[in-house]
Image: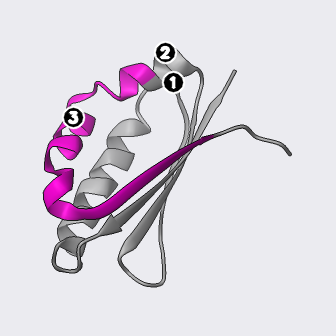
């Protein structure tokens, strides 16, 4: 069964360009993963908010994704780049 995630990442004003680069790199790498069905990144009009829409084949695929070096590197630097991160795990209704 697919796993759906929406992640909202709010940048600090002075790190938005650096954060954008890191997030775009995550997209490129994540889309190569076998369990990745969808990994889209959107940028809000306020230029400080990024939104991921993700779909993973299953929980084990998502767990493997969360252990990838580029994800771990993002987690390690997230505190210096972001103001807030909120992740929603959802079920598709329609």
Which numbered marker is on residue 64? none
> Which residue matches tag 2?
60
Q: Which of 60 and 24 is in front in this view?
A: 60
Question: Quarter holding the N terminus?
Answer: top right
Give the image location of residue 61, x and y in percent.
48, 20
Neighbour tally class for label 2: few under 14, some 14-19, many 20 plus, Cα within 10 Å? few
Q: Which residue is drawn at 54% across and 20% down?
A: 59
Q: Which residue is drawn at 28% across and 50% down?
A: 25
Q: Which of marks 3 and 1 is nearer the N terminus?
A: 1
Q: Distance between the residues labelled 3 and 2?
A: 17 Å
Q: Is residue 58 left or right of residue 23?
A: right
Tag 1 and tag 2, C-beta contact below 8 Å = yes
Give the image location of residue 6, x and y in percent.
55, 50
Q: Nearer the viewer, residue 2 or 85?
A: 85
Q: Earlier in the sequence, mark 1 or mark 2?
A: 1
Q: Can residue 41 be seen in this view?
A: yes
Secondary structure under tag 3 reads helix
> Which residue matches tag 3?
72
Secondary structure under tag 1 reads loop
Neighbour tally class for label 1: few under 14, some 14-19, many 20 plus, Cα within 10 Å? many
> Which residue matches tag 1?
35
Q: Does the magenta segment cover residue 69?
A: yes
């Amino acid at each position: 069964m697919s796993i759906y995630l929406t992640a909202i990442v709010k940048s600090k004003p002075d790190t938005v360009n650096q954060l954008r680069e890191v997030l775009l790199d995550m997209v490129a790498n994540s889309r190569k993963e076998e369990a990745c069905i969808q990994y889209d990144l959107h940028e809000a009009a306020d230029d400080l908010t990024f939104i991921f829409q993700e779909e993973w084949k299953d929980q084990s695929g998502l767990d493997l994704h969360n252990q990838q070096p580029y994800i771990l590197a993002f987690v390690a630097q997230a505190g210096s780049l972001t103001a807030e991160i909120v992740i929603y795990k959802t079920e598709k209704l329609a």
